[in-house]
Image: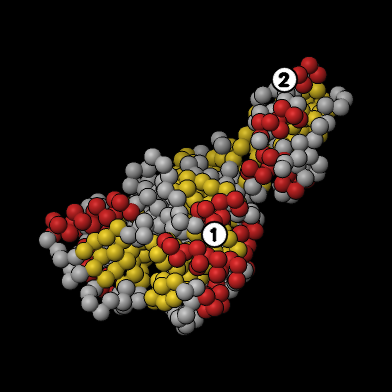
Amino acid sequence: MAPRKPPLSDLYADGARFTDFGGWEMPVEFDSIQTEHAAVRESVGIFDVSHMGEITVSGPDATALLQRLTSNDVQALSVGDSQYAMFTDESGTILDDTIVYRLPDEAAERYLFVPNAGHDEEAYDRFVAHRDEWDLDAAVENETDTWAMVAVQGPDAVDAVERVADADVSPFDWGDGTFTQAAGVESWVSRTGYTGEDGFEILCPTDGIEAVWEAFVENQGCTPCGLGARDTLRTEMGYLLSGQDFDPAEEPRNPFEAGVGWTVDLDTEFVGRDALAEIADAGVDEEFVGLMLRERGIARHGHEILAEGETVGHVTSGTMSPTLDEAIALGYVESDLADPGTEVSVAVRGREKRAEIVPTPFID
Amino acid sequence: MFEVPEDRKYMESHEYATTDGDTATVGISDFAQDELGDVVFVELPQTGDEVSQDADFGVVESIKAVSDLYAPVSGTVTAVNEELFDRPELVNEDPYGDGWMLEIDVADEGEFDDLLSADEYREQTE
């Protein structure tokens, strides 16, 4: 199967290196991961994130359908607001994570949610199947191929977005969004992101994204950033990566193990709720933690975590932190070893390196 | 275009060895450093260690990739560029100069015949 290409692909094809991610051929690096990472931490960068899925749910039972398929309390969302949530199966295992936006619509309840790359079709199928099973009145559309998405991230993002978009976005709280013109293109602009910096995500029709990208890159001087920097930025924050830090097949985890129990509202009815209520009572055996290596080496996905010679967990994400210039990692360890300050080791290509459990985010 | 100096020979796996004399200086090519991106970690053998042609002698890691390093020729390690432990970015900045990795006392100069010439290597990377 040929990889899906984001609509901006031709525009920057000569200036980027590409990688396959979730079935999409995406830019991994434009200039260098370190300079792109620094641009986002210190000024402003722009990411093409059109590989993210877009699914809309609308109609009289839209709220009820989302409530029953996501872990968080959808009813708490006011128009223009958004929330982070998990999709879980009956056993409480995370299938994917998502942001749910409540869109302004006078005619009906209407939501947009954004599943991860390559998860749009399964999410769509799941929503349609449950809607039909529960006989709910809601339209579900997979609009992944009609939307493009960029993320403008960094301390200077608000200034850049203020200049490109018509709406006054500076008063927005995190998660707030609005429909507005950006570079003359009708767009959904929300104060969200995956970098730990202030920033915005902008969704618009695929045929308008080139104007939006060029407005930010050419006129506002935003640094084009690839998925490489997106990964180092999110790892420094301790944010989960779907398919790597959790995955229903390779790394089955519930939200309490994965450190996102705060997205679970047990007072709502959703698929997985009963299992998660039991897990909340019983506690979890393993927890998602941050690690810093205290010897030269870089922990990577799949490396074992050891204590006193015994395997006590494994690394799910690891890299050299461009901000700290230290090797950082995320992974799961037995709960009694999960407290910050606990000394463990990581088997880096078979050789044990001293490491310490540390709080996340890794940076201030 | 990538630099491919004429005064050394190359491996298909992108390591180079200088060929003037009994001691070969070993590192990775300009093409290789560019493919890797920002080099953030290098693991090398110690002075006195033996390396064998085509066997791995160390590791170079960029943020996004981990690559084994293969010895272009067999011999005894006579010097290690320890500067790279603190400044691995030298591999990106100057792969044929300050970014060198090892000096090897070459056991068998005949092994140079197994390596690619600059022209042959350039062809491989085009």
- Disc 2/disc 1 C-alpha distance (Å): 43 Å
Q: In this view, does A86 lie to the left or right of A197?
A: left
Measured from the top left, where is residue A131 in percent x and y? 17, 59
- Between A302 and A335, which is closer to the camera in this rendering? A302
In the image, what residue occupies the spot 46% across and 56% down? Answer: A7
- Between A31 and A244, which is closer to the camera in this rendering? A31
- Between A358 and A125, which is closer to the camera in this rendering? A125
Give the quarter of the figure containing the C terminus of chain A: bottom right
Of tags 2 and 1, the one toward the viewer is: 2
Q: Do the residues labelled 2 and 1 touch (CB within 8 Å)?
A: no
Give the quarter of the figure containing the N terminus of chain A: top left
Q: In this view, does A250 lie to the left or right of B63?
A: left
- Quadrant of res A177: bottom left
Q: Residues within 10 Å of mark 1 (few under 14, many from 20)?
A: many
Q: Is residue B95 left or right of residue A46?
A: right
Q: How crowded is mark 2: few (under 14 residues within 10 Å), some or many (20 or more)?
A: few
Identify the chain of the residue marked 2, using the numbered disc in the image.
B
Circle 1 residue: A233
Measured from the top left, where is residue A126 in percent x and y? 24, 53
Name the amino acid, label 2: Asp
